Image (cartoon, rainbow, N blue to C red):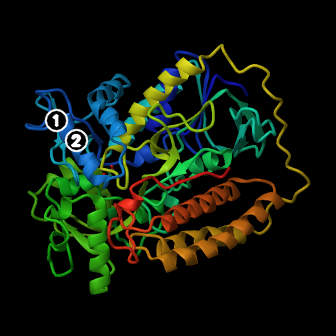
Amino acid sequence: MTADFLVIGSGIAGLTFALRAAEHGSVVVLSKGPATDSNTAWAQGGIASVLPEGERDAGDSVESHIADTLDAGAGLCRESAVRMIVSEGAETIRDLCSHGVSFDRENGHYMLGKEGGHSHRRILHAKDTTGKEIARALVEEAKATPNLTLLEDQYVIDLITTSKLGAVAEDRILGAYVLDRASGEVRIFRADRVVLAAGGCGKVYLYTTNPDSATGDGVALGWRAGAAIANMEFIQFHPTCFYNPAAVGPEARSFLVSEAVRGEGGVLINAKGEDFTKKSDPRGSLAPRDIVARAIDRELKRTGAQCVYLDVTHKPKGFMAERFPYIHETLLKFGLDCERQPIPVVPAAHYQCGGIVTDEWGKTAVRGLYAVGEVACTGLHGANRLASNSLLEGNVMARRALQEMLRLYPPGRDASNPPAIPEWEHGDVAEPDELVVIYHNWDEIRRLMWDYVSIVRTDNRLRRAAARLKNLKREVKEFYWGHRVNPDILELRNLVAVANLIVECALRRKESRGLHHTMDYLQTDDHYLADTVIRKF
Ligand code: SIN
């Protein structure tokens, strides 16, 4: 299959790009599962944006949103990227509304929520299912757009570049090998312009707020294609994932209780009812996430408890059902009435702040390959992402990536003499017979990352993780080359690659900064005031 634009991923970044690109050429969007199954769709809180005067919180300003973002990022944000993305807040809301997204309003004005690290109310939302509303509108429009083909159940095996085919003169993107889940067939998708918008890697950890599809595919694909990767040590742990030891099924295990609940007055307490987060930061439950997650971790270790509690029992009756209907109903389904009982919560892996290095136009080190959304490292998040900045970044960067692509590689002016791409060789290999190997390795990676590479780290634990991952990588490689490809082995291959990148980055940073906290180097050290950048070749 050939297209002017190939987009990998169907969240806010991928679809914002695709819908605009379809006005300029043919677009193929590949989604690993159903198109609405993205990290975007799982976002509860909302999208941070400073609206024009008169619509914004009194005293709020773009400068204030920039300052909060820089403060959360602990010295590692690229200020020019922060300024550019945050200044586009109002335009992003206009753009999403033009696609049919509907945000909550009251008396004709947008309702504005608050989350940790924000000094003002500036989070636009659609109740507590903002991401679902965005995904609904964008997917509906994508399905009705003539120049846009949206293909589901497609697993990208690898990107194809000139250097991978042995041409060393210039490294440019040529397309991708893609496995169709239903037929088991591997097809070549040819495109001179490829956008990676495949989201993050929460599933690399045992406990995560992410959907099952978040297996780090985008970063792994970019890494193998030769793009630079940065700051993978900065994995954000969301402080309030519902703690449900009797949980069965992904929804129960990964159920997020939005930070917006704390924005509306929810308070974190321990089993004795004490507001322990105030000991770490005067902002208490509404401090930036790295601080709150560490405060919880410390409290759990100190008391030996399995969880802490998010208390909203002091809110007026009916408030939770009205403002957070999805959270309220889901908790009721699990047997908890949050208007009467505090919600048991634990931190869980939530967001990848690093990723494929891009410039302020989404450009990677490989010609024609762009990365947008969670998969990319633009410099917006630095060492810790400010809540609800990511949907904003996804929309802004997608619009900019298209602008730049049209300038540099306009459709109709394709690269001359494209090399022939060989068909995918399944070779003479058996169907995977021992699936237990895949499941065992999958579980082992996720547990070791949780035990050794989570909220609080040490060099010893990181080295242990690196040694185990080396063996796992070898085993996965043997399995990958020795068997016919299937979705499970492809995801496992990506998962182990990304786990390695996280550990490698973490081992290089000999200080504590933002989300990277190590007992061996408790202080911030400005010798490390730079991105951790690594490249395969
Ligand atoms: C939340 O609703 O707490 C998640 C928002 C975010 O991660 O930006």
* Position of residue 293 in the picture relative to residue 442 (left or right): left
Nearer to the camera, 385 or 360: 360
For the point 67% across and 70% down, the residue is 470
Amino acid at pointer 2: His
451 lies above or below 231:
below
Per the image, label 1 sits on a secondary structure element best described as loop
Nearer to the camera, 104 or 513: 513
Snapshot quadrant of residue 439: bottom right
Snapshot quadrant of residue 261: bottom left
For the point 34% across and 73% down, the residue is 522
Nearer to the camera, 108 or 477: 477
Amino acid at pointer 1: Ser
Residue of label 1: 61
Residue 356, percent from left and from top: 53, 46
Residue of label 2: 65
Marks 1 & 2, CB-CB < 8 Å contact: yes
